[in-house]
Image (cartoon, rainbow, N blue to C red):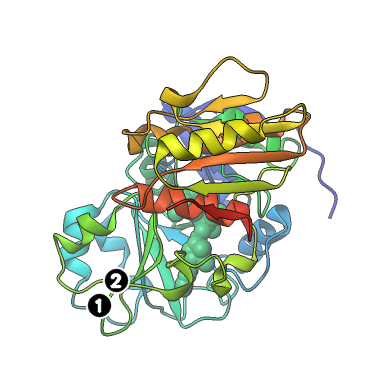
Amino acid sequence: MVFSMETKILDANNPECIKRCAGIINRGGLVAFPTETVYGLGANALDEKAAEEIFALKGRQMDNPLIVHVASLDDVGALIKTTPEAFKTLADAFWPGPLTLIMEKCDIIPDNVTAGLDTVAIRMPEHPAALALIRASSKPIAAPSANPSGKPSPTKAIHVMYDLSGKIPYILDGGDCRVGLESTVLDISGKVPRVLRPGGVTLEELRAVIKNVEVANQVEVSSPRSPGMKYRHYAPKAPLTAVLGPPGETAEYIKQRLSGNTAALLFDEYGFEHLHVVTYGSSKDYSKQAAHLFGALRKLDNMDISAIYAQTPDENGLGFAIANRLKKAAGDNIVDLR
Ligand code: TXA
Ligand code: MG
């Protein structure tokens, strides 16, 4: 496949720009658009060829299914076979918002979108531009995060430009993503709802609404050896070590290892003037950490360094998702001072 086109950044608040991008979607093309979690790389979810382009452009494994984005509850019926008991409660509580629900799929969804699974991931994003794009194209939109596979997700239009310039015609610029981490993926196709990926909606928030929620084995990353950890995701170029424990101790551990070609990712309170120190929010403010994490990893990618040590939050609330991303970025490099 030959990529060579000029990529333009369009204003997501301008209805004309939304219309232009909807036209691309309807012609089987791809555009990047903002959501409240991260920027997505969107295509018509009912068009097998368009979905194929998403995989090609991201260099994504064909066995990794896509999320289908809808703009209203009425859009869901045509996509799923049966409505799970918990669906209405969860959608009422968390949609539009950073929760993706896995349910049994209908045949109109091409097999490549779901990677051959008989379930489909569906989410209603909250960002007005995402909703406007879905409505203007009258299509459910399949969209992974708009980054090359394995790299940190984009949380600003300029991140997408950096990653996908020349490969797509338009990037809708809707500003910085509010959440900054991907949606929580919750499988409700079985008896007990199961979190497959922690994200913008916390476990505590889910448990306040539905009684039983399990966490799938591969995301229980308390053991660095668990099988899901063998792949690096969300990963900066230099190897990253996730350092867990009380912030005072992790900061000290990292400081001792900072050298000419080593970088540190620290909470604000522990940051200091140094060429290779990047901060990403207060140790007490998970929302800030989430919003700044991927941008911080991208900053580290622009440094001439050969190792990164990252102060990692505890796993309460949004901390669970933040720590999950850092551990995935770390692969096997996890230091636990607890
Ligand atoms: O916040 C988000 O979810 C963003 C924005 C753009 O909406 N999208 C996103 O997509 O993060 P992606 O492709 O980067 O991640 C989708 C995740 C993957 O972990 C994938 O394996 C899982 O959802 N997934 C999708 N369909 C699934 C299915 N049928 N069963 C299990 N997991 C599924
Ligand atoms: Mg992704």
For image coordinates 27% across by 49% down, the residue present is: 96
Residue 71 in the image: above or below residue 101? above
Q: Residue 25: image x %, image y %?
A: 55, 49
- Labels 1 and 2: the sequence-earlier one: 2
Is residue 203 shown left or right of residue 293? Answer: left
Label for residue 282? none
Visible residue check, residue 105: yes
On-image quarter of the N terminus = bottom right
Q: Is residue 336 left or right of residue 254?
A: left
Q: Nearer the viewer, residue 233 or 177?
A: 233
Q: Are marks 1 and 2 in contact (CB under 8 Å)?
A: yes
Q: Tell me the amino acid under the disc marked 2.
A: Gly
Residue sitting nearer the eye, 178 or 282: 282
How far from the left and from the top, in percent, is residue 101? 34, 66
Residue at mark 1:
83
Q: Which mark is residue 77?
A: 2
